[in-house]
Image: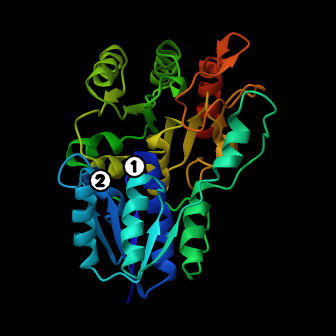
Amino acid sequence: MKRIIVTRFSAMGDVAMVASVLSEFQQQHTDTEIIMVSRKLFAAFFEHIPRLVFHPMDPSGKHRGVLGLFKLFAELKKYKPNFVADLHNNIRSRILGSLFRLSGTTICTLDKGRAEKKALTRPNNKVKRQLKLTTERYADVLRTLGFKAQLSHALKKTERLLPEELSADFSKVKKSIGIAPFAQHSFKVLPLSKMNEVIARLSQLDYSVYIFGGGAQEKAIAEKWADEYTNVKSLIGQFNVSEELNIIANLDLMISMDSSGMHMASLVGTRCVSIWGATHPFAGFLGYGQRYEDVIQVEHPNRPSSVYGNKPCDCDGIEAIDLVSSQMIIDHITNICG
């Protein structure tokens, strides 16, 4: 066995994309073992990948700071890896990689394409073109280490068991639609009034709607929608990540911002309609295997303003995400689901 340590510590969607790549990579290489290093929360993304060991990284606990990275290095060195694939390229992963390089282990680090992304997102003279997909950038690291990696970029539906408490719901004839209406940055979130209109219309059309993702504040909003509209349920805070993946695998369709909900849908082979504002699929973060025609966005010369959606994107006095109408989303969903 050739043993590869793979590092990607965050964010949730990025780690989910790593799982999509490693799933196909391990199918193509029966002589490799992967040691995946990431936050404990993301372990569920890798549960079904053969010959993969998940090693949790605790950046705010025992692996905090430089001394913590030395501890992590000591833990990982026991696996006696042949290669290290740094799919993060941040300060922590580079320090860890340097320790392995000094110990004689072959290492390759992700090329994030920073110059291209800066040209795409700068205010003036944007170079607006499709950049290499992030999943292909991940695969390039493995290729540089000497492995062939052919990505299909196709959704592969996975069979997963529903949590028992939802099995009765999914046995109905109604189409099941998941919605992940929130994101880390507000500039990627459709205004709640518009999302309310979408949910109200889907309820009227007799779809079963399940709301995913968020903390206490988002949970309160989702539960209000569930109380107000029939066939709408909030799943926020009710299931762990593994169970959420099982539920998403059984959906007919997922609706998500440019956020982790889209990438979780990709991981289990569920089609996703994604909604974009300050960010743009050109940066390479469209969900693995998802269709460009399922992207809902309004093109404007000022878009995108940032890769991650952490900056406002003023489009003639209107924030970019506000250019998207609720009717655009409803029409797209009904065209797919009937």
Q: As rendered, which of 330 and 36 lies closer to the eye?
A: 36
Mark 2 neighbour density, 10 Å: few (under 14) some (14–19) many (20 or more): some
Task: Find the residue positioned furthest to the top.
Answer: 317
Question: Residue 140: which numbered mark, if any?
Answer: none
Q: Position of residue 202 (x, y in %)?
A: 49, 25
Judged from the image, the secondary structure of the residue bearing numbered disc 1 is loop
Quarter of the figure with the N terminus: bottom left
Q: As rendered, which of 48 and 303 lies closer to the eye?
A: 303
Image quarter of residue 174: top left
- What kind of residue is marked 2? Arg
Q: Position of residue 312 (x, y in %)?
A: 59, 21
Residues at marks 2 and 1, CA–CA distance in whole angstroms? 7 Å
Q: Which residue is mark 1?
A: 10
- How was the colour assigned to the protein in this rendering? rainbow
Task: Find the residue positioned furthest to the left.
Answer: 62
Q: Is residue 6 visible?
A: no
Decide if residue 11 is on the left or right side of residue 112: left
Q: As rendered, which of 255 and 68 lies closer to the eye?
A: 68
Q: Which residue is mark 2?
A: 39
2 or 1: tag closer to the N-terminus = 1
The residue lying at 36 percent from left, 21 percent from top is: 230
Eyeballing the image, is 100 above or below 116? below
Decide if residue 212 is on the left or right side of residue 113: left
Q: Position of residue 294 (x, y in %)?
A: 64, 41
Image quarter of residue 49: bottom left
Eyeballing the image, is 126 above or below 246? above
Mark 2 touching mark 1, by CB under 8 A?
yes
